[in-house]
Image (tube, rainbow, N blue to C red):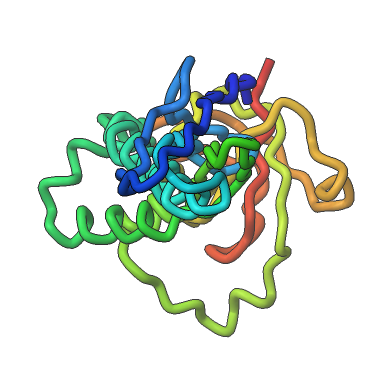
Amino acid sequence: MAAVAAVVVAVVVVAGAAPGPARAEGAKPGGARPDWARGLVIATGVGVADRHAPSPVNARGPAREAALAAAQKQLAAALPALPLAGGGTLADRLGDAAVKARVDRAIAAAIVVDAEPSTDGSWRVSLGVPIEAIRQALTGPRAAPASDVDGPPVVVVEGARATPAIGYKLGPVAAPALWVKDVPAWAKDAPRVKARGASAGAIELADAKGTESTLFVIVEGR
């Protein structure tokens, strides 16, 4: 993730002045963006300390909340542009009230990826929405059958010539996926399968492996 310059704001102590609200700013440059290898859409918000607060300690809480709100706002603005494996973008599905509600819940439950306070009481906070949460927002909740335990927890798919998108079927199953350039160390011993092609929202596999509870690590074809 590109480094984001910290916002430095001088704290001015004004005797008798009532503290004002912390100010939220989106991180610059950039904005929310998908990290397909980590399986997250990440946004960074900055909460600028109130210069009228009695001290940086007093400013810190409101500034952190402002940073969280700014990051969530960026996520809400960026998620609709995420591509879907079957074509189109997430925006095309947000007219469905149930899908929209699940996406909103995913944003509200975004993971704190990084949080960095400044000495003046300001905060820079990065939030991540799991791409898998968006996939499940589209499909709805799924009961995991007992047969899922029979499949490998991770399968590496090699040579996939497809553009990262949400909702690909891997062979016959729809399952969570990461998109990587190189196989990560934690997946080096996982079973591997060759991709035979991709079309109509599916990646064809030379040998069907895994279940809907398997994490597929897709190594992009070169």
Q: Which residue occupies 49% across, 34% down? A: 44
Number of numbered discs overlaid on the protein picture:
0
- Give the percent coordinates (x, y) of residue 80: 27, 35
Q: Which residue occupies 60% across, 46% down? A: 113
- Give the percent coordinates (x, y) of residue 122: 53, 38
Asked where in the image residue 106 lies, by quadrant, the reply is bottom left
Residue sitting at the far bottom = 146
Left or right: 150 in relation to 120 = right
Question: Is 28 placed above or below 15 here?
Answer: above
Question: Is 182 placed above or below 191 here?
Answer: above
Q: Is residue 131 visible to the viewer in this orientation of the structure?
A: no
Residue sitting at the far front = 15
The quadrant the N terminus occupies is top right
Q: Which residue occupies 84% across, 49% down? A: 186
- Give the percent coordinates (x, y) of residue 210: 64, 60
The quadrant the C terminus occupies is top right
Q: Nearer the viewer, residue 127 or 158?
A: 127
Q: Which residue occupies 33% across, 57% down? A: 137
- Give the percent coordinates (x, y) of residue 151: 68, 68
Left or right: 126 in relation to 143 = right
